[in-house]
Amino acid sequence: MTASQILCQGLTKSFGDSEVLSQVDLLVEGGLVSVLGPNGAGKTTFLRCLATVLTPDAGSVLVDGLSPLHESDRIEIRRRLGYQPQNTRFAAGAKVFDVLDYVAVLKGFENDRKRRHWVFYVLDLVGLRDRAGDNVGDLSGGMIQRLGLAQALLGQPSLLILDEPAAGVDPDERFRIRDLVADRRADATVFVSTHLTDEAAVSDQIMVMNKGKVCFIGTPGALAQVAAGHTWTQPDRPSAPVRASWRQADGSYRCLGTPPIGSTPVTPTLEDGYLTLVS
Amino acid sequence: MTSYQVDPQRIERNWNAITAELDVPPASWVERFLGAIGLPAHITRVALATPSLRRLWLLATALVVVIGLASADSAAARDSIFTFLMIAPLLPVLGVALAYGTEADPAHEIGLATPMRGLRLVLTRTVVVLVCSVLALAIVALLSGNAMALAWVLPGLALTLMTLAGSTALSPKRSASMVSGLWVVGLLALNAAAADPVSKFVRPGQALSMVAAIVAGVALYQRRQRFDIVSDIS
C-alpha cells in the first residue's frame, strides 16, 4: 500500500457568515501530519473536507489526483480512507465486534471470512480482542477511542484522518494511542488533529491552524525555531506586555515575545513555537 | 520415520482463521432468523446495524402484522381495513425517519466516509423492513382470506420514496412528518367524500401509488449524493 498524496488548493468553507476555512493550500505525501490549533481554528472542518464528508465552498481537495466532487472519484477515495471523526461515539448496546463488522461491511468486505479476519486484525492492533463480545457501553473512554481508531484502520487505508483520537483520555491511554497512530505512518498519509504539542512532537510535519488559515507547516524542530530568540524566563510575572507568559513548576515565568534588555533567551520548545504563532 | 515440513506462515494463517471463527460473539436471534430465511450476513448487518434499528425493525414488522390481523375481523371489516390501509404504509416511512442520520446512529459520520453509498444504505434498511412486513402480511392475508391486507404495499413504497426524496432537502423527520400528514389528511378527505373509500385502494389507488413511486424514485436518484455528505439541513 502506497501512502496517498493530498493536494489542497484555496480550500474555503463557511457556515453562514462565518468563514471557517480560508484559502488553505497544502501538498502532503506520506508521513504523519499533526494538525495543531486552538478551538475554532478550523481543524475539524479541514479534516472533514479531506475525509470527503463535507464539501468545500471554494477551492479543491485532490487525493491521489481524485476529486471528491465527482461521485466515482469520491467512492474511490473512500476505498483508500480511514476516518475517525471528533467525539467518536457508537450505539450503546452494540457489541464491539458488531460495530467493527458493520463498518467493515460499509467498507466493502462482503465476504464473511475476510471481514472477520480484518475485524480481529484491527482488534489485535488496538488491544481490544478480548473485549470483542462486550457492549460498547461497558468500555472506558480510552477504549472507545481505540475502537474508533480500530474502525479507521480496517482495510489498511492509505489515507488516515483522525480527529482528536486521544481527546479526554488518561495519559497512559493517550501514549498508547499516540504510538498506534505513529506506527501507521510507514504505509499511509496520516492526519491527526490535537491540542497537545507533546502528541505532535512525534509527527513528521506539523500544520498549525488559526482562524481558518494555515499559519505554519513544517517539522517539529522548525516549529520550535519559530520562537528562537523570543523565549526567555524571569523570576517574576512580566510587568510589560508580552505575547504569552506562564508560571513554570520552579515558580519562574516563561515568556514569549520581544525579550527585554538583559534577559537571557532560552532554547525554545515546540510549545513555545506554537504559542508564538497563535497567541 | 517420515517428517513433514509445514509452512509456519500457513499454520499461522489457519490458526488465525480458526480463532477468528471461535471469537465471534453469538448473533442476536433476529440476525439468526434473517440468516435462516436466506438473508446474507452482510445485508443483515447493514439492516440491523444498531440495537435501536433492531427494535425499530421488530416494531414495524409487528405493528403491520397486528393491525393486519385486527383488520381481518369480519365485524366492521370495511372500517378496520380502511384504518389499516391508512396506518400500514406509514410504518416504513417511520422507519426511514428514525433509521438514518446522526440521531439514529451515533457513528453516522463514520459510515459516510466509507465507499457504501448513503442511498444504498438507507434503501437496504427500508427494503428489508418492507420485504419482511410483506412476507408476514402475505401469511396473514392467506390465513384471513382477505387480500386487501396487501393493498398498502404500493402506497407504502410510494410514501417511503417520497420521504427519502424529501430527506434530500429537509431532515428525515421533517420530511416524514410532511409526507405522513399529507397522506392522512388526503385519506380522511377521501373517507368523507367517497361512499366506499376502500375500493379506491384497488385500481386508482394502486396506479396513483405506482406513478408517485416512480416520480419520487427518479427525484431520489437524481439527488442521491445528498446522502453521501454531512447534511446541513435540520
Image (spheres, rainbow, N blue to C red):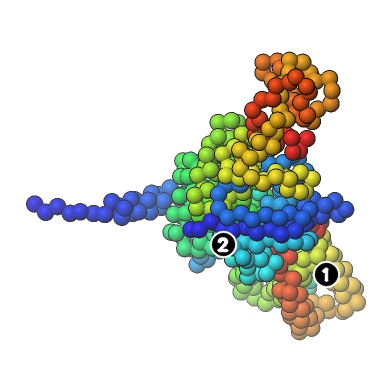
Query: Vertical placement of A134 versus A243: above or below?
Result: below
Q: Residue at x 52, y 48 (%)?
A: A185
Quadrant in the picture for residue B81 = bottom right
- Tags 1 and 2 in contact by the CB under 8 Å rule? no
Location of mark 2 (residue): A79
In the foreground, B143 or B98? B98
In the image, is B29 to the left or to the right of A44?
A: left
The residue carrying mark 1 is B183
Residue shown at the point (60%, 31%) measured from the top left = A170
In this view, the residue farthest toward the left is B1
Q: Which mark is residue A127?
A: none
Place of residue A269 in the rendered image (x, y in percent of width and height, measured from the top left):
64, 31
**Mark 1–mark 2 distance (CA, rounded to whole Å):** 40 Å
Disc 1 crowd rating (10 Å Cα; few below 14, some 14-19, many 20+) is some
Question: In this rendering, would B118 be left or right of A203?
Answer: right
In this rendering, is residue B225 above or below A152?
below
Viewer-nearest residue: A161 or A205: A205
Q: Residue A264 falls in which quadrant of the image?
A: top right
Position of residue B145 in the picture relative to residue B29 (left or right):
right
Mark 2: secondary structure: helix
Examine the rendering and report whether any part of residue A207 can be seen.
Answer: yes
Q: Position of residue A136 (x, y in %)?
A: 58, 43
State the residue at coordinates (73%, 30%): A230
Question: Where's residue B7, x and y in %?
Answer: 26, 54
Task: Name above or below for residue B157 compared with residue A24.
Answer: below
Q: Chain of mark 1?
A: B
- Callout 2 amino acid: Arg
